[in-house]
Amino acid sequence: MKNFRPYRFPPLSLVAGVSVASAAEAQASLADGFHQGMERGYREGHELGLAQGRGDGLAEGRREGLRTGRDEARQEVLAQFDSLAAPIDALIASLRQMQADYQGALRREVVDLVAKVARQVIRSELVLQPVQLLALVDETLATMPPAREGVEVFLNPEERQRILELAPDRASRWTLIADPRLEPGECRVRADGREADAGCRQRLAACIEQLETHLAEDGEEVAP
């Protein structure tokens, strides 16, 4: 028969004490681990958030810097362009002014030439046919109220004499009066106290004025 050695269990008080101490230590260790985890999580989260914030701020700062740099560069280029374009604009304006002055001078020369030629033609025609002045008198009287009394026509003395010689019948309709103050081709009409210019000068002046207006309008249409 085998020999058995008896086993002695530890006292219950010792077992209970060890169990209570182990539980307390475990609870304390768990609390410390919880606090350490909290602190670690806070620290890591803070560091992560700080790093991310720095990265986002750096990216936004870079984008804002690029925008600011582009705007400043654009403004600088525009300012340089304006400074370079100013002399060119002044030159273009000067050339346009020179062109306008040239065209204006050319128009004046054309008008003066036309007026000079017209005066010579009128003078030559009146020398050959001074009776044409009577047609001007008829046109002038047609624009005036009907005369109840005689009509007086003032003429250059030489032209009056030639008209009396060449067309006495037509000249007899009015009273022709010699006026040495009138140049050849000039004529004035007086009827019922009213007086009008029937000569060639004012008619030529009206034609020249129309010519100047027409040339000026053409110049405005051609100008850029």
Image: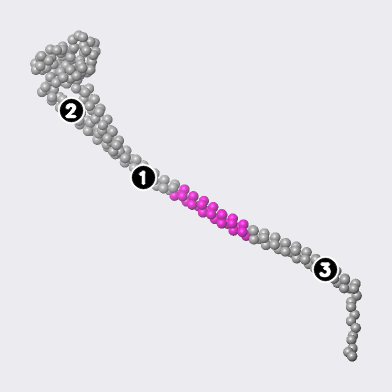
Q: Which residue is mark 3?
A: 23
Disc 1 residue type?
Ile
Residue at horizontal 11 percent and vertical 17 percent from the top: 163
Name the foreground residue: 86 vs 136.
136
Give the quarter of the image for residue 82: top left
- For marks 3 and 2, give the CA distance: 135 Å
Residue farthest to the bottom? 1
Question: Under tag 2, what secondary structure?
Answer: helix
Please name the amino acid that badge 2 sits on.
Ala
Question: Foreground mark, 1 or 2?
Answer: 2
Horizontal arrangement in the rendering, residue 187 relative to residue 94 (left or right): left
User: In this rendering, is residue 111 above or below 194?
Assistant: below
Disc 2 crowd rating (10 Å Cα; few below 14, some 14-19, many 20+) is some
**Residue corresponding to mark 2:** 118
**Label whose residue precedes the other's in the sequence (1 or 2):** 1
Residue 53 is a magenta residue:
yes
Sequence-earlier tag: 3 or 1: 3
Q: Is residue 166 visible?
A: yes
Label 1 sits on residue: 88
Residue 75 location in percent, x, y?
47, 48
| View extreme (top): residue | 149
SS of the residue at dot 3? helix
Instruction: Based on the picture, tell me whether residue 7 belongs to the magenta stretch.
Output: no
Left or right of 118 in this view: 58 = right
* CB within 8 Å, label 1 to label 2: no
Q: Residue 179, how many percent across, how many down? A: 17, 15
Residue depth check, mark 3 versus mark 2: number of the one nearer the observer: 3
